[in-house]
Amino acid sequence: MGARFEARRQAIRTPRAAATAGILFAFLLSTSLTLLLVNVPPSGLPPEGLDEQSLRQVTLALNLMPFAGIAFLWFIGVIRDRLGENEDRFFATVFLGSGLLFVAMLFVAGAVAGGLASASVGLEPAVDPTWLYGRFVTRTLIRVYAMRMAAVFMISTTTLSMRFQIVPRWLAILGFVGAGVLLLTVGSLVWVELIFPVWVLILSVNLLVTSLRRSQPAAAAS
């Protein structure tokens, strides 16, 4: 009886942990991407480079990225624990691999951007080849590779969630549509990168609400 109650309590606690990590990740990554897009627009910087206020905001955005990555890794771990032994090996491999690659490329892009931000005071962004190269590498890592890995992560997570009925149908459709938009339009549309953290936020809130609803009958039965 005690072992069964403990297993039930663990099953209830796992979605809440995933929801907490997902909400934290969505907040941190959305804030970081917004600060970067506002202060380093796709059209480029003025000839004088970053001013002091913009440099502080870019530094804050880059400092938030590691914490966003940690929260995302926690989110992946808890989702895998939620699936347990029932997870499909094929989709689980794609799910884990795309998530890890997303975090790795996010960290590399943050490191490159951090080096550029530190050196931007003495550079002329409009003509300096170092700045142009670093900016191109950073944008390519985030907008082309990392976000497409995020789209693959969305597809695999949504497929697994549908198979084990973890999410409602409307959320599954939203995941596939968002992943398609990221795959086809990222790199050409501004702000489209925010689709991923917004989707994680919606998924996390849904997991939290579902967990709270299930915990009430379980508490009454115990």
Image: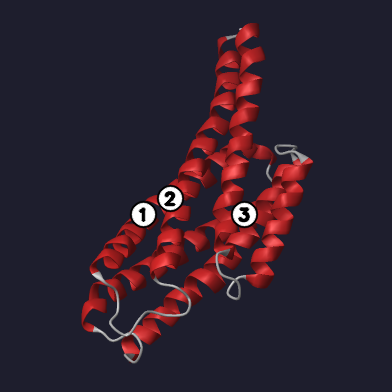
Question: Which residue is pictured at 53% across the width and 71% down the height?
Answer: 143
Q: In this figure, which colouring scheme has been used for the structure?
A: secondary structure
Camera-side residue of 90 and 193: 193
- Look at mark 1 in the image and give the residue it sits on: 64
Label 1: how many residues lie within 10 Å, few (<14), some (14-19) or many (20+)?
many
Secondary structure of the residue carrying tag 1 is: helix
Circle 3 packing at 10 Å, graded few (<14), some (14-19), many (20+), is many
Up/down of 15 relative to 186, above or below: above
- Looking at the image, residue 128 sits to the left or right of residue 197; the answer is left
Q: Amino acid at mark 3?
A: Phe
Secondary structure of residue under mark 3:
helix
Q: Position of residue 106 (x, y in %)?
A: 44, 64
- Residue lying farthest left? 122
- Point out residue 166 in the picture as x, y percentages from the top left corner: 70, 37
Amino acid type assigned to the residue bearing label 1 in the image:
Leu
Q: Closer to the camera, 14 or 175? A: 175
Q: Nearer the viewer, residue 165 or 138?
A: 138
Give the mark, 2 or 1, whose residue is nearer the N terminus: 2
Find disc 3 in the rendering and name its residue.
Answer: 95
Q: Which residue is mark 2?
A: 28
